Image (cartoon, rainbow, N blue to C red):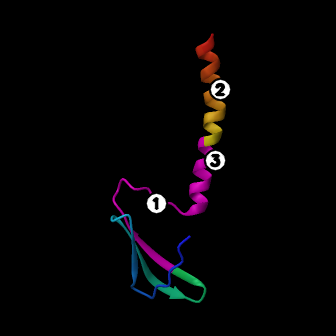
């Protein structure tokens, strides 16, 4: 993990096309802005983990049934 210090209105660039800017700092909260191409999905981590779990469940449920149907 890379740990960086940034002040308000400072930014970092990831992979030439994603920019993360510090917008506001209040106490222990930091507001960030993310600029990325439309084709780059950006999620809060808790939402991303929920999507991953839902995808795993869908593959396990639907995938096994699809395989059974193929083998019949």
Indicate the quadrant where residue 11 lies: bottom left
Q: Which residues are magenta?
A: 31-55
Element class at badge 2: helix
Indicate the quadrant where residue 49 lies: bottom right
Q: Position of residue 54 (x, y in %)?
A: 62, 45
Q: Position of residue 22 (x, y in %)?
A: 44, 81
**What's the mark number on residue 53?**
3
**Residue linked to disc 1:** 42
In this rendering, position of residue 29 left or right of residue 41: right
Question: Residue at position x 50%, y 60% from top?
Answer: 43
**Residue linked to disc 2:** 64
Q: Earlier in the sequence, mark 1 or mark 2?
A: 1
Q: Position of residue 5 (x, y in %)?
A: 50, 84
Q: Earlier in the sequence, mark 1 or mark 3?
A: 1
Question: Residue at position x 65%, y 39% from top?
Answer: 57
Q: Position of residue 24 (x, y in %)?
A: 47, 85
58 lies above or below 68: below
Question: How far apart are the two marked residues, 1 and 3, measured between alpha carbons?
Answer: 17 Å
Element class at badge 3: helix
Element class at badge 1: loop
Which one is nearer the viewer's eye here, 25 or 5?
5
| Callout 1 crowding tier (Cα within 10 Å): few <14, some 14–19, many ≥20 | some
């Amino acid at each position: 993990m890379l740990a960086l210090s940034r002040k308000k209105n400072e930014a970092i660039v990831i992979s030439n096309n994603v920019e993360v800017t510090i917008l506001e700092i209040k106490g222990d909260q930091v507001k960030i802005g993310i600029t990325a191409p439309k084709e780059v999905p950006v999620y809060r981590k808790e939402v991303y983990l929920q999507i991953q779990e839902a995808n795993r469940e869908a593959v396990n449920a639907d995938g096994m049934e699809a395989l059974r149907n193929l083998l019949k």
